[in-house]
Amino acid sequence: MADLLRVHAALQPDKPALIEGDRVVTWAARDERANRAANALRSLGVDPGDRVAVMAFNSIAGFEVSGGLSKLEAIGVPINFRLRGAELAYILNDSGVRAVCAGPEFVEHLEAARSEVRSSLSFLALAGAPAPDGWLSFEDLLAAASSEQPEVEEVEGLGATMIYTSGTTGHPKGAYRPHGVPLEQVMHTIGMFDLRQDDVHLMAGPGYHSAVGFFSALTTACGGTIVIMSRFDAEDALALMQRHRVSTTFMAPTLLHRIMDLPEEVRARHDVSWLRALILGAAPCPFSLKQSATDYFGEVLYEFYGATETGINLLLRPEDQLRKPGSAGLPPDGQEILLLDDDGNPVPDGVPGELWARSVWLATYYNRPDATARSMRDGYFSVGDIAYRDAEGYYYICDRKIDMIISGGVNVYPAEVEACLHAHPAVADVAVIGVPDDNWGEAVKAVVALHPGARAGEPELLDWCRGRIADYKRPRSVDFVADLPRDMAGKLLKRQIREPYWEGAGRRI
């Protein structure tokens, strides 16, 4: 990646590499700033293979840090900017970072966590951030650093990465790829999405999310231009698509939902005809949302299934989005997929099994050999997702194993019930959970948020499910809420939704 920065700077020095608001950074300037960042970090004792944490909104400064880390062959550790206090200290301690870089909004939060950090770190305030006592100004360090290319042994392909999982099931775990990914696989992934040198990519989601950073890295590898959104706003996203003729973007379905929730007359004001690839991931995208998005954007939707730990395991291409409702797609070349039952035996088509994946993208959990061992089987990795395969070889994710409901001894996979309810025109969002039941052990409950102004009561939604899904899967009750908690990647916080119903039950299943 460091070599690609240098090559693109030589071949297209004046082409925009990064755009944030009215500020434009050319490829020559991006490469020069990356050199300065690498030399500045090295002056602080950061060596190849060391880790540096970054907590910031999307910004040019963030790309300067990541470019410097690539030049130095050091490893960036992006931190979820919603974490606070002990949560921050946990990641800084667990990852063993040598330095941490903070945007202006997060200096105070990291300063508050310093007392719980066990090792001595360099704390760097990014551009625009005040530098409290004991902190260094990243901008001052860059100004004083050499602009020459640092001399380090370069790694071919996508360099080493460490990204902490969301932690919705406990402490976050660092998904660690110490040897990166071969260049051949990087180029193959670029081809999967037909990414090009003349692409303009909209960075819409938070950069700490693995897929957001990944698709920005692929655009960098191609020599394209990245338009940076500090924080997402639906109408601003459409305005940027028109202004910069955006051709590719990645977003979680929750962000696409915000765009499609805009009034039709607002969406009609923006020309998005240059968009060639709208890539969806991080959470399942409801079929109704795909339909409306296809009507607006055209046949440009890609949806992938994968995980921070395993990369992209399945891909549903634009031509299959409406033909294969609910499918997560087919395995790309280089991905091997197994569906196994609880005894480790392969399941036949149409029968749900735990999904195991093998490829060069697999990560291990940093400092957690026990967790890695639990997730590995004969070179295959599982994050506990349940899937089945149809007769054409397309895969369908039923749910995560931990979300499975056992009602009367029968397994119920909430995602299937949620998909049924999502199809109701009044339903904006839904979570299906198991709640305590004296007779059945667990009863299926739907927690529903309706579209603004929509009306639908419990009897109507229960009747909607009748005939659409098997009787044993149908919710026995429906609760209504204004909205459902999701993390920044758009994933439902099921544990948080379940908790009130299980309080005092003396059990959790």
Image (tube, rainbow, N blue to C red):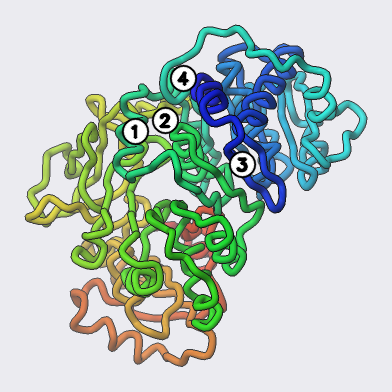
Q: Nearer the viewer, mark 2 or mark 4?
A: 4
Q: Amino acid at mark 1?
A: Ser
Give me the C-alpha separation between circle 1 and circle 4.
Answer: 18 Å
Q: How many marks?
A: 4
Q: Which mark is residue 371?
A: 2
Task: Write down the quadrant of residue 427 in the picture.
Answer: bottom left
Q: Earlier in the sequence, mark 3 or mark 4?
A: 3
Give me the C-alpha separation between circle 2 and circle 1.
Answer: 6 Å
Position above or below: 106 against 150: below
Position above or below: 2 against 213: above
Task: Write down the quadrant of residue 283 in the picture.
Answer: bottom left
Q: Nearer the viewer, mark 3 or mark 4?
A: 3
Q: Earlier in the sequence, mark 1 or mark 4?
A: 4
User: Do tag 1 and tag 4 residues touch (Cβ < 8 Å)?
Assistant: no
Please name the residue shown 17% across and 53% down the image: 394
Q: Which residue is mark 4?
A: 178
Viewer-side residue, 210 vs 171 = 210
336 relative position to 155: left or right: left
Position above or below: 400 against 213: below
Give me the C-alpha separation between circle 3 and circle 4.
Answer: 27 Å
Q: Earlier in the sequence, mark 2 or mark 3?
A: 3
Q: Which mark is residue 18?
A: 3
Q: Secondary structure under badge 2? A: helix
Q: Earlier in the sequence, mark 1 or mark 3?
A: 3
Q: Earlier in the sequence, mark 2 or mark 4?
A: 4
| Residue 258, position as x, y percentages in the image | 52, 69
Please name the residue shown 71% across and 18% down the image: 41
